[in-house]
Amino acid sequence: MVQVAAALLFAVAAGLGLTVILTMLKNNEAAILSALLGEGAFPVDPAPQPGPMSQVVTLRRLPAGRHASRPLRGAGGTQPQFSRAA
């Protein structure tokens, strides 16, 4: 009896899966077929071609003395401070 119930459940699941697949094909038929044919559903703009730049972007320099991070100094002296959360 359990085997019959399992077979019926499998048949219902397979039928539901087939219904979903057919519904997807019905709704997106053109996109799916063009993707399978290798054309793609959406046209792609051509990539930009390499060549000379029209403008050169220069980076802003920081004033001297502001480029290095300063170490934190706390009440612990020279010992590193660790979190006790771990």
Image: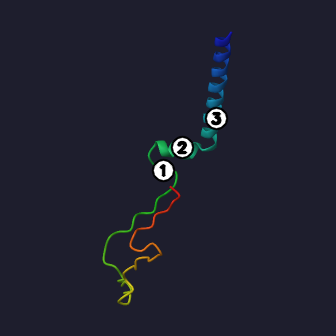
Left or right side of 53 for 81: right
52 versus 23 height, above or below: below
Decide which of tag 2 and tag 1 comes sooner along the chain: 2
Dot 3 corresponds to which residue?
20
Q: Secondary structure at mark 1?
A: loop
Left or right side of 21 for 83: left
Say which of 72 and 74 sits in front: 74
| Quarter occupied by residue 3 | top right
Say which of 32 and 59 sits in front: 59
Q: Amino acid at mark 2?
A: Ile
Dot 1 corresponds to which residue?
40
What residue do we see at 51% from left, 55% from top? Answer: 42
57 versus 14 height, above or below: below
Mark 2 to mark 1 CA distance (whole Å): 8 Å
Dot 2 corresponds to which residue?
32
Q: Position of residue 53 (x, y in %)?
A: 34, 79
Say which of 56 and 39 sits in front: 56
Q: Position of residue 27 (x, y in %)?
A: 64, 43
Decide which of tag 3 and tag 2 comes sooner along the chain: 3
67 versus 34 height, above or below: below
Instruction: Give yes or no for contact between labels 3 and 1 (Cβ–Cβ under 8 Å).
Output: no
| Quarter occupied by residue 21 | top right
